[in-house]
Image (cartoon, helix red, strand yellow):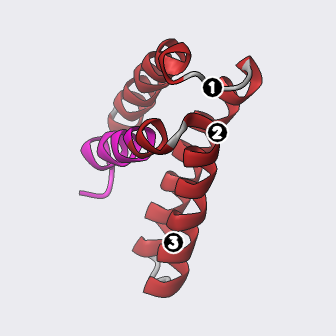
Amino acid sequence: MRVLARVELVAAWLAVMWAAAPLTQVASAGLAVTVPLVVVAAGAALEELERYGAGVVGLVLTAAAVWMLAAATWGVVGGTALLVSALGVLAASSPHR
């Protein structure tokens, strides 16, 4: 049941991000759809890796690379908002709390 709630929360977050994409002047519709998916997938993967004891350096470097992707496509403010909101959604809906 908790996993279903997480899927619903992430789906709602994706819908909001896709609706907000024109406000941040994303270069193309493809980037508006793909970048939020990459951000949330990378965040979920990092969450699992951290749970299994991954090193801090690898986690930080991966998070920085994901932020650079988001900032390059959505702008610095939009990319930061995208990353922070994705981490918030993942933390709020984490099944491992």
Instruction: Choose mark 3 or mark 2, whichever is in front.
Output: 2
In this view, 61 is above or below 21: below
> Could you tell me which residue is drawn at 63 percent across and 51 percent down?
69
In this view, 43 is above or below 54: above
Tell me the tag on residue 73.
2
Q: Main secondary structure of the magenta part?
A: helix
Q: How many badges with numbers are in the image?
A: 3
Q: Nearer the viewer, residue 75 or 9?
A: 75
> Could you tell me which residue is drawn at 52 percent across and 66 percent down?
64
The earlier-in-sequence mark between 3 and 2 is 3
- Magenta part of the chain: 81-97
Q: Could you tell me how far apart the alpha carbons at marks 2 and 1 are, in whole angstroms?
A: 6 Å
Q: Could you tell me how far apart the alpha carbons at marks 1 and 3 are, in whole angstroms?
A: 30 Å
Which quadrant holds residue 33?
top right
Q: Which residue does the numbered mark 3 point to in the structure image? A: 49
The quadrant of the rendering that contains the N terminus is top left
Evaluate if marks 3 and 2 touch, with contact meaning CB atoms under 8 Å apart: no
The earlier-in-sequence mark between 1 and 3 is 1
In this view, 38 is above or below 74: below
Look at label 3 and name its amino acid. Leu
Evaluate if marks 2 and 1 touch, with contact meaning CB atoms under 8 Å apart: yes
Look at label 1 and name its amino acid. Val
Residue 9: give x, y in percent of width and height: 37, 27
Residue 45: give x, y in percent of width and height: 55, 59
In this view, 50 is above or below 33: below
Residue 88: give x, y in percent of width and height: 29, 44
Instruction: Choose mark 1 or mark 3, whichever is in front.
Output: 1
The earlier-in-sequence mark between 2 and 1 is 1
Evaluate if marks 1 and 3 touch, with contact meaning CB atoms under 8 Å apart: no
In the picture, measured across the screen, residue 75 lies left or right of residue 53, that is right
At mark 2, the secondary structure is: helix
